[in-house]
Image (spheres, rainbow, N blue to C red):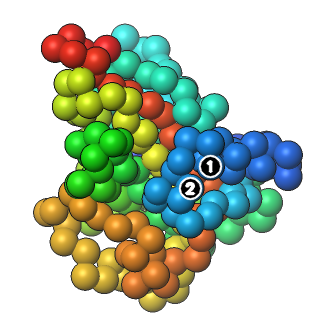
């Protein structure tokens, strides 16, 4: 394991009920992520996004759509999955974070910006789902940097079961803009995501918020 690659997902034995997964799915629909990014979303587990800070504090996004300051979302987050019913330590996972609102939600001509892509993430014996080699982080985390005055941007996390024989397909790793996640998922044989979450950040004017 490479400790300098801090993206990881932690498994916690919290049951994901039909009620709370339906609540997440509803939040994605109300926010327009469905159908802007995916045609539908029916999670079977719950996800959290936690930003750690140098002073030892952190901010955890457990409610989809939570607003966070742009400066507070620059550190590489840890991602937590709750409610995996039958954890399989040989299962691989894929995690992506995207901004579908580039350069703004009204004119998303660069939809979507890829802010993170990790593959071959594994559930360890201690319960963490993490990358074991540098190659597993296809695109390292990039913090939000929306244009000033472009309004709130949705930063969306999806977690997928990784199928056997998975490859990244025709993905241009160096070009993170204009990424169609649905098309890429179809090309690479991904089933619908098992979990997701999102936060909202913006730069209202020349002042970072």
- Residue closest to the eye, 36 or 170: 36
Residue 44: x %, y % from top left: 73, 59
Against 123, residue 5 (above or below) is above
Residue 9: x %, y % from top left: 53, 48
At horizontal 53% and vertical 59% (from top left) the residue drawn is 35
Q: Quadrant of the C terminus?
A: top left
Against 198, residue 126 (above or below) is below
SS state under label 2: helix
- Residue closest to the eye, 87 or 140: 140
Can you tell which quarter of the image residue 12 is in? top right
Q: Is residue 109 visible?
A: yes
- Residue closest to the eye, 100 or 90: 100
Location of mark 2 (residue):
34
Residue 40: x %, y % from top left: 62, 64
As drawn, the residue found furthest toward the bottom would be 165
> Quick one: label 1, few (<14), some, or many (20+) residues within 10 Å?
some
At horizontal 31% and vertical 83% (from top left) the residue drawn is 169
SS state under label 1: helix
Q: Are marks 1 and 2 in contact (CB under 8 Å)?
A: yes
Against 20, residue 69 (above or below) is above
Residue 37: x %, y % from top left: 46, 59
User: Could you tell whether 108 is left or right of 155 in the image?
Assistant: left
Location of mark 1 (residue):
29
């Amino acid at each position: 394991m490479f400790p300098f690659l801090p993206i990881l997902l932690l498994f916690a034995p919290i049951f994901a009920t039909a009620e709370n997964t339906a609540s997440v799915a509803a939040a994605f629909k109300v926010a327009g992520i469905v159908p802007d990014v995916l045609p539908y979303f029916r999670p079977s587990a719950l996800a959290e996004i936690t930003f750690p800070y140098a002073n030892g504090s952190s901010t955890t996004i457990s409610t989809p759509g939570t607003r966070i300051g742009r400066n507070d979302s620059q550190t590489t987050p840890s991602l937590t999955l709750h409610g995996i019913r039958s954890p399989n330590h040989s299962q691989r996972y894929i995690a992506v974070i995207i901004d579908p609102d580039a350069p703004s939600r009204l004119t998303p001509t660069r939809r979507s910006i890829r802010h993170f892509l990790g593959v071959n993430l594994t559930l360890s014996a201690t319960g963490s789902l993490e990358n074991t080699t540098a190659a597993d982080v296809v695109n390292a985390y990039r913090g939000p940097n929306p244009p000033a005055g472009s309004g709130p941007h949705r930063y969306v996390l999806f977690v997928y079961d990784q199928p056997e024989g998975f490859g990244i397909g025709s993905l241009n790793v160096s070009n993170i803009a204009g990424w169609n996640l649905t098309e890429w998922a179809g090309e690479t044989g991904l089933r619908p995501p098992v979990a997701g979450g999102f936060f909202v950040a913006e730069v209202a004017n020349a002042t970072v918020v």
